[in-house]
Amino acid sequence: MELIITEKDNAARRISEILSDGSFGTDRRNGVNVYRWGGKRCVGLSGHVVGVDFPPEYDDWRDVEPVELVDAPMVKRATKENIVRTLQDLAREADAAVIATDYDREGELIGKEAYELVEEVADVPIRRVRFSSITEREVTEAFADPDELDFDLAAAGEARQMIDLMWGAALTRFLSLSSGQLGNDFISVGRVQSPTLKLIVDREREIEAFDPEDYWELFADLTSEDADGAFEAQYFFREEGRENERVWDEAAANAAHEQLLAASEATVTEVDRRTRTDQPPTPFNTTQFISAASSLGHSAQKAMSVAEELYTAGYITYPRTDNTVYPEDTDPVALLETFADTGTFGEDAASLLEADDVEPTRGEKETTDHPPIHPTGELPPRQDLSADEWELYELVVRRFLATCAEPATWEHLRVVAAANGCLLKANGKRLLDPGYHAVYPYLSTSENFVPDVTEGESLAVSDVRLEAKQTQPPRRRGQSRLIETMEDLGIGTKSTRHNTLQKLYDRNYIEGDPPRPTKLAMAVVEAAEQFADRIVDEGMTAQLERDMDRIASGEVTLDEVTEESREMLSVIFEELHESREAVGDHLRDGLKADKTLGPCPECGETLLVRRSRRGSYFVGCDGYPDCEYTLPLPSNGEPTPIDETCEEHDLRHVKMLAGRSTYVHGCPQCEAEKAEDEEDVVIGACPDCGDDHEGALAIKRTRAGGRLVGCTRYPECDYSLPLPRRGDIEVTDTYCEEHDLPELHVVQDDEDDPWELGCPICNFEEYQARQRKTDVEDLDGIGKKTAEKLADAGIDSLVKLADADPEAVASEVQGVSADRVRDWQAQAREAIDEGGDDTDPDDGEETVVEDDEGRDTLGDVEAEVDEATAG
């Protein structure tokens, strides 16, 4: 039996389908899919199934000094034991094995790990196959001509693992222990992560240090008798051979303004016409793909996750590549002919085939491992892809089409006119030939109208404008621009840069897009610069990246590079040793700054966002226990102070980060005071205790900013219903016949018509019915086919889905990413809980969560009404 080993389960399924001509069957061993046909078995790993770690005696952070990790031995541990067991069981039955993991540094290391696992239990020949797309042609050709594993390339990947573990673990422990940040709130440091963070922090410092300068610009509208409509022209003056539009002296700007106001006409003094050729874009490498995907609203992590799925399904080539030149064996005409037969791209592809010669563009970088990212020619039915998958697949297809298209041609027209001693200029452009823009609609083709005037012609002057402006600070780099900068500086690799950014988000070092550093991030970088600047030195990490490339080429060994890295790290710890207390103080100040809201109204100390022992958030005084002042916060999301400040209380506003339902809560003290000032509005009898105890239902506002309908006898009666958080509640004169309660309307400032909520009891019952999910197929984003795939992987219930390992599921179910599995798990757990308690009522915090319609949905709503404490 021949055993084929791939990097992931979805690749194993795809390769099995190709090699068996669709006749394969599927077995399950230890929860792992094994594909069989004839005398072959194919199994997919889950990326790395073996990881590098320190021995168990180094696990206790408090008993092991961080510096000890510099020279600590490293061991390999199985991270996916069921997959390792299955692989070795199959290896014992095999006569030969074939490694078919991705062909890059990481894929070669994963292949080497599989090689060693097989070698432990079986003495069989092991070969290696390589391909750049999982298509029938490439896979068949690769298996017809197997090669040997590249142990140097694998060693480069292993060196990266060992160095990242050594640096990350030792420095993370040192900073976390120094600042007292343990558990889930540890302070993370990394060889690539920290220099990347410094890039973001340095740009933020430039922005904060920027001192704006005042300047003025002048504009006027010009009109030609022979043209319809006016066109805008800008004032400029010549100085030392240069044209200047900005006037830095206010008096000079006002003088020019007066001159232009006095002018009724301008005389054309210069007319310059020229055409410009706009070359088509070069083929996609990884960085350029991420940049283009970013313009469509996709994060770097999301773009690469989707690209990986499209690659595994056989629709695009390998998405991790530096290459921008199609290899000689790429046949652009044949690929265009494939698309010419399709509905979506057929017309565009056919138009390109009309050219006498199809000669694709070439970028500056040419490598031999993988081609640029391009479609394989295997066309997916649109209904089989999600909206994101189709959007990025179309981007890849259209980029290929653009590289095969003709240049675009623009006509540019520059007009200069003199008006009462002042010079005005206008620049117009229009597209003469769209060229590649006809097939690649992602770049601007906007035109600027300037009429065809002649020298000496008189133009009417109107609407003269003087605009006061200020110079602007440098812009924050977006994710794609950051990745380009990392590439330029040699930080990270094409395979890791997007993951590095995601780690910075996950550790709360950056927020928003473009990424902005938190106060903690600023403190971490400042501490590193002050006490051990090599931690954030991009030159150091770039040198290590070059060393790993040298390992891959056989110039140096793994041991030589890891020993060099240990020496660097030892020097860093010598620098840090005497500064441990100062480092800790600096980091604690940064941590506090991220949570600071403003002055406590009772004692004048600082109010901070805090977390209770049960995990819920509230506002507490830094003077505790001397001052016990608290304010509640909503429970739906993670609170983050923002720059906007309340004028009345001098407190920073709070944003609640809750995925798609993220919203600004505002000033916590204002929200609490609203609840105290706003009287309850009684709307009818309580259905639980109205008859026996005369309890009534009333519209209530909570101190945490939420609203609900609750019983006036609370806490004796805890009956309650949710209400939307935003908008004004109107009580109408129309009553529900079943519950004898008035129908409610929600009036939003930005909506013309109110939201007719209706009877609050009927509305909530309808909402519960809509939200109730009992099967996997009920979850958003899971259709019948996907549910069947999940069932084949052993996930046939909400409980099994909620308990599953997202990475393992993604590796077993074709076309599904780990991020998507996590989204489904969140829905599954919510369905299982059936709106159960979010917090203990004794926390006194809000426990409703907000759905996509902006409605507060009930958890433990009695805590909404009981507002005696805030945590």
Image (cartoon, rainbow, N blue to C red):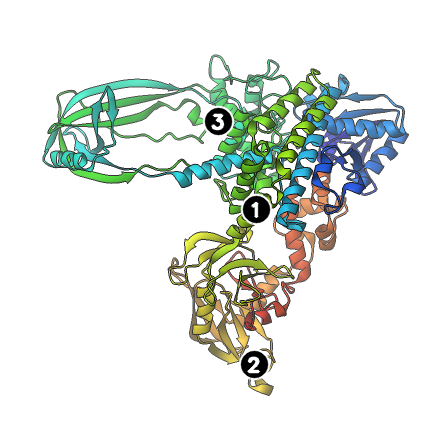
Judge left or right: residue 431 versus residue 814: left
Mark nearer the N terminus (1 vs 3):
3
Q: Which of 320/630 is in front?
A: 630
Which residue is labeled 2 in the image? 713
Q: Are marks 2 and 3 in contact (CB under 8 Å)?
A: no
Q: Which mark is residue 587?
A: 1
Residue closer to the observer: 621 or 298: 621
For this rendering, which residue is in front, 354 or 14?
A: 14
Mark 2 or mark 3: which comes first in sequence? 3
Find residue 511 and report its horizontal and vertical position in percent. 52, 45
In the rendered view of the protein, which quadrant contains the N terminus?
top right
Name the residue type under label 1: Leu
Viewer-side label of 1, 3: 1
Q: Which mark is residue 193?
A: none
Examine the rendering and report whether any part of residue 40 can be seen: no
Q: Which residue is mark 3?
A: 347
10 Å crowding of disc 1: few (<14), some (14-19), many (20+): many
- Against 566, residue 607 (above or below) is below
List x then y, in percent, for residue 46. Answer: 73, 36
